[in-house]
Amino acid sequence: MRVLLVEDDAAIVAALTELLTHEGFEVESDSTQSGACRLLAEQAFDIALLDVTLAEGSGFVVCAAAQKAAPSMPVIFLTASDDEYSTVAGLDMGAVDYIAKPFRARELISRIQAALRRAHRAESVFVVDDVRLDTASAQVSKAGREVVLSALEYRLLLYFFQRKGKMVTRENLRDAIWESAGEYVSDNALNVYIKRLREKIETDPSDPCIIVTMRGLGYKVGE
């Protein structure tokens, strides 16, 4: 799970990064509104932890950018301010939780995990073009007909669909498959996996419109 941490207190960033990394999360942090918005436009995240008051900008603006970039991604506000206005404003903007500093580490992890569980229950079906992936049943269909995928092909397709509209690099894919396959994945092997998946989900595998190659950059699925 990838976490976007937007906080301008270096000590808090260091402590949270260590905590979240120890819990198995991958953390990307930024201390500014502009930097955080840029990250949201360029990368895919599973959850965002935002400080309301930043030295440069506002966490509320970052929240709005997060809602636009990934409407289903949960946002949790972290702030020293516990006033009613900030709490209500954050929740009204779409944040799923609001935690006042100082907070207990285990409580924060528990609330992050709860937010992710709720988000995953809500987002159990992904649709791109005429391909439908249902995570609840682990079934994939194209134009209403079931598509049989290997476990690795399913994982690869889910990784793509969860990042719909985002650039996915070959390094991202290798990391995702490596964890599943348990061994290093070469460029040639990755090419084979992509080719096999396209043969099963593309109407014309020679001219793919679902998993589109962005030359020199990686791949992109959907808009």
Image (spheres, rainbow, N blue to C red):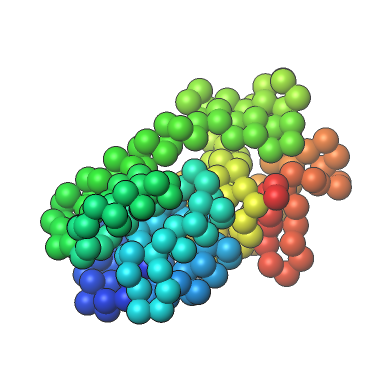
Q: Give the answer, above or below, for where 95 lies relative to 6.
A: above
Task: Pick the residue in front: 1 or 205.
Answer: 1
- In this view, which residue lies farthest toward the top? 145
- Left/right of residue 201 with respect to residue 169 in the rendered view: right
Q: Is residue 17 visible?
A: yes
Residue found at x 17% / y 49%: 107
Q: Position of residue 179 (x, y in %)?
A: 44, 51
User: Where residue 218 appears, x then y in whole percent?
Assistant: 67, 62
From the viewer's perspective, is 220 left or right of 30? right
In the figure, residue 28 lies in which quadrant?
bottom left
* Number of numbered labels in the structure image: 0
Q: Is residue 185 visible?
A: no
The answer to which quarter of the image holds residue 69 is: bottom right
Please name whichever residue, 3 or 203, is drawn nearer the observer in this view of the structure.
3
Tell me the residue at 51%/67% (across/down): 37
Question: Depth check: 98 or 210 in front?
Answer: 98
Q: In this view, does 207 lie above or below 32?
A: above
Horizontal and vertical percent for residue 50? Answer: 35, 62
Left or right of residue 51, residue 46 in this image: right
Residue shown at the point (46%, 63%) measured from the top left = 61
Query: At which x and y percent is residue 171?
Result: 56, 64
